[in-house]
Image (tube, rainbow, N blue to C red):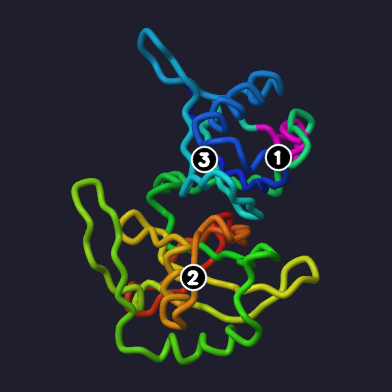
Amino acid sequence: MSERIKVRIKFSKHGALKFIGHLDIMRYFQKAFRRSGIDIAYTGGFSPHPVMSFAAPLGVGLESDGEYLDVELNALESTEEIKEKLNEQMAEGMEILSVVILPEKSGSAMAAVAAAGYYISFRNEFAPPEGWQSAIERFLARDKILVEKQTKKSMMEIDLKPAIYDFRLSSYREKDCLYLMVNASSSGNIKPGMVVGALCRELELPFDTAWLMVTREDTYLNKGTEEEPCFAPMDAV
């Protein structure tokens, strides 16, 4: 039996597809591979399924320019051909952006996630009073940014400060917004609403995560160390 080849696929998700949950996205890609004719590898046993893993599954209602999927193939086609064949199967709002071959001993996409970047804006009717963005610098200057986070077992207080790598004014698609990069690893997994909510509470402003429009800018791995991180998009392998 020939050795399998692992590839990492980067894709974007916009429009109505943002309302599709993670399990449905998995099934969507399984069907796309079958229809494309790409020779994807399957597990053994009585119920074989495609060998694939997603990096940091996106929440329902969020759009993204940087989602990742690792798959194992039985035979290697050119990465450009894989990209073209999959894009032929994509619905409107979903696009394959890149396909790269992974090193032989690379870990799974999920295990490699270190951080995620987001573009964040408020829906027009829920925008805070003008000038609130100027408080970001003061907010980040705090020694600690304490919030409550729900875990599987209980509610616990955590400090967001070490998990915020970047937080500033930015623009996306020619509109003003916030840019936020946070710890997205399995041990951190900070959601953008937690940070923006903490900022609003600092300013004594009302807040609800449903008021936000969020687009994931990209998902990152860490090529440096925990003390001196060097983040790179997950297809930079």
Amino acid on which disc 3 is placed: Asp
Residue 80 located within the stretch drawn in magenta: yes
In the image shown, does 28 or 37 lie closer to the viewer?
A: 28
Label 3 secondary element: strand
- Residue 71: percent from left, percent from top: 53, 35
Report x, y in % for residue 26: 53, 30
Tell me what residue is drawn at x 57 percent, y 64 percent. Answer: 118
- The local secondary structure at tag 2 comes to loop
Asked which secondary structure carries label 1, the reply is: helix
Label 3: few (<14), some or many (≥20) within 10 Å?
many
- CA gap between label 1 and label 2 equals 28 Å
Q: Are marks 1 and 2 in contact (CB under 8 Å)?
A: no
In front of the other: 31 or 152 = 152
Q: Is residue 23 magenta?
A: no
Instruction: Read off the residue under disc 2.
Output: 206
Give x and y (percent) for residue 122. 63, 66
Residue 80: assigned label:
none
Horizontal placement of 136 versus 65: left or right?
left
Q: Mark 1: which amino acid?
A: Ala
| Image depth: mark 2 or mark 3 in front | 2
Magenta part of the protein: which range? 77-87
Which amino acid does the dot numbered 2 rest on? Pro
**Residue appearing at x 75%, y 32% in the figure:** 91
Q: Earlier in the sequence, mark 3 or mark 1?
A: 1
| Quarter the C terminus occupies | bottom right
- Local packing at callout 1 (Cα closer than 10 Å; few below 14, some 14-19, many 20+) is few
Mark 1 sits on what residue?
16
Main SS type for the magenta part?
A: helix
The Cα atoms of the two marked residues, 2 and 3, are separated by 40 Å
Residue under label 3, please give it.
70
Upstream in the sequence, badge 1 or badge 2?
1
